[in-house]
Amino acid sequence: MIRCVEELRAALALHGITLPSLTVDLPTFAARYGPPPPLVALGNCDTATARELATALRKSARKSARG
């Protein structure tokens, strides 16, 4: 689970994006019951970061659509 958060943080960094509050959601991580799996808390970000994230996702989607 922590590895997943680290991978996401690294992937975002490739686009110059930092989500300061990105972490494992501790209540779901510590829960003893079955599925669903623990959650990743993306946290809060400012509007500039939200726009950067949207831009990166759109660029990636266009590249995927081209094949």
Image (tube, grey):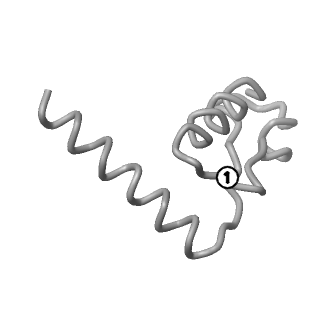
Crowding near the residue tagged with mark 1, few <14, some 14–19, many ≥20 C-alpha atoms within 10 Å: some
Corner quadrant of residue 62:
top left
Three-letter code for the amino acid on which mark 1 is drawn:
Thr
x, y percent for residue 46:
64, 73
Q: Quadrant of the N terminus?
A: top right
Q: Which residue has dot 1 on it? A: 18
Using the image as rendered, state which of residue 63 and residue 23 is in the foreground: 63
Q: Is residue 18 above or below residue 50?
A: above
Corner quadrant of residue 39:
top right
x, y percent for residue 33:
77, 32
User: Which residue is pictured at 58% across the width and 42% down the height?
Assistant: 12
Q: Is residue 46 above or below residue 19?
A: below
Using the image as rendered, state which of residue 5 and residue 62 is in the foreground: 62
User: Image check: 58 left or right of 9?
Assistant: left
User: Which residue is pictured at 56% across the width and 76% down the height?
Assistant: 47
Q: Is residue 40 above or below residue 19?
A: above
User: Image check: 46 left or right of 54?
Assistant: right
User: Which residue is pictured at 67% across the width and 52% down the height?
Assistant: 18
Using the image as rendered, state which of residue 55 and residue 38 is in the foreground: 55
